[in-house]
Image: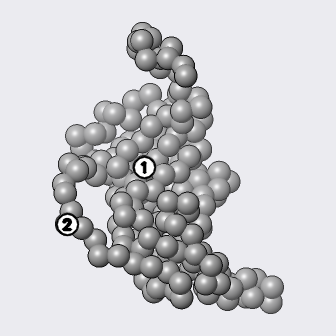
C-alpha cells in the first residue's frame, strides 16, 4: 500500500489540471473557425477527473459506453463485425494554447505534436478500443482514456481490420 501511495503522489506531480510548468510555452489562440463538427454522442467512463483518468487506455480496462444520439443510432449497425474500433472524441476540458510541454515536469520540453497529450490546439482524442457488445443505442468497449461525458465525434473500424467494401479506384494502386 505504501508503494501505491508513493505512486499516487508521484502521479499527481505529473498530471495537472491547467497549470503551466517551468519551460512550457503557451500562445495566444487565433480566432476559431467553425469546422462544422457534430457530436454524435457522449462517452460514459468511470473517471470524473483528469487526476483519475489513465494516460492510455488498456484493452483489459473497465467497460465504457459510447452513447450514440439520434439520428445516428442506425449507424451502429455492423460495428459488431470488428474486434477493435477507433473512437474519436473531443477532449472538452483540455487547454488548447500550449506549444511546448514538459510531460515529466523536469523542465525538459517537447513540442505538442510530438506527444499524445490531451493538451493540443484541436483537442481531438483517439483510442483503439476492444469491442464488447451493443446495447440499444450504446456500444460497449474497453480501452478508453477519457473523462466521463466526453463528447463523441466518430466511431470507425480499426484500419488494420478493415478491408474497403467499395470497388478499387486508381489511387489505391499508386506507389512512389
| Quarter residue 125 falls in | bottom left
Distance of label 2 from label 1 (alpha carbons): 24 Å
User: In the picture, which quadrant includes the C terminus?
Assistant: top right
Q: Any mark on residue 52, and which?
A: none
| Quarter residue 154 falls in | top left
Q: How is the image coloured?
A: one colour
Q: Nearer the viewer, mark 2 or mark 1?
A: 2
Residue 2 lies left or right of residue 68; in this view the side is right
Residue 136 lies left or right of residue 12; in this view the side is left
Q: Where in the figure is residue 52, as x and y percent of width and height?
A: 56, 76
Q: Secondary structure at mark 2?
A: loop
Q: Where in the figure is residue 138, as x and y percent of width and height?
A: 41, 46
User: In the picture, which quadrant includes the N terminus?
Assistant: bottom right
Residue extending furthest toward the front: 176
- Where is 84 relative to 105, above or below? above
Q: Secondary structure at mark 1?
A: strand
Identified at 49% across, 34% down, the residue is: 157
Q: Nearer the viewer, residue 35 or 166?
A: 35
- What is the tally of numbered marks visible in this picture? 2
Q: Where in the figure is residue 82, as x and y percent of width and height?
A: 55, 31
Identified at 50% across, 17% down, the residue is: 174
Q: Nearer the viewer, residue 10 or 69?
A: 10
- Where is 159 relative to 95, above or below? above
Residue position marked by numbered label 2 in the rendering: 31
Q: Where in the figure is residue 158, as x and y percent of width and height?
A: 54, 36
Q: Is residue 133 visible?
A: no
Check whether the beta carbons of the residues at disc 2 and disc 1 lie within 8 A of each other.
no
Residue position marked by numbered label 1 in the rendering: 88
Amino acid at each position: 500500500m505504501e508503494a501505491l501511495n508513493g505512486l499516487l503522489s508521484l502521479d499527481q506531480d505529473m498530471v495537472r489540471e491547467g497549470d503551466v510548468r517551468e519551460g512550457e510555452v503557451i500562445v495566444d489562440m487565433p480566432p476559431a473557425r467553425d469546422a462544422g463538427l457534430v457530436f454524435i454522442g457522449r462517452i460514459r467512463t468511470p473517471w470524473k477527473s483528469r487526476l483519475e483518468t489513465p494516460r492510455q487506455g488498456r484493452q483489459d480496462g473497465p467497460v465504457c459506453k459510447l452513447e450514440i444520439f439520434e439520428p445516428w443510432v442506425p449507424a451502429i449497425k455492423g460495428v459488431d463485425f470488428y474486434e477493435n474500433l477507433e473512437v474519436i472524441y473531443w477532449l472538452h476540458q483540455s487547454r488548447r494554447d500550449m506549444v511546448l510541454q514538459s510531460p515529466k515536469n523536469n523542465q525538459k520540453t517537447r513540442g505538442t505534436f510530438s506527444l499524445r497529450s490531451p493538451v493540443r490546439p484541436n483537442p481531438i482524442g483517439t483510442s483503439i478500443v476492444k469491442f464488447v457488445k451493443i446495447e440499444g443505442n450504446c456500444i460497449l468497449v474497453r480501452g478508453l482514456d477519457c473523462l466521463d461525458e466526453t463528447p463523441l465525434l466518430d466511431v470507425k473500424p480499426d484500419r488494420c481490420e478493415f478491408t474497403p467494401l467499395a470497388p478499387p479506384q486508381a489511387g489505391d494502386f499508386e506507389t512512389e
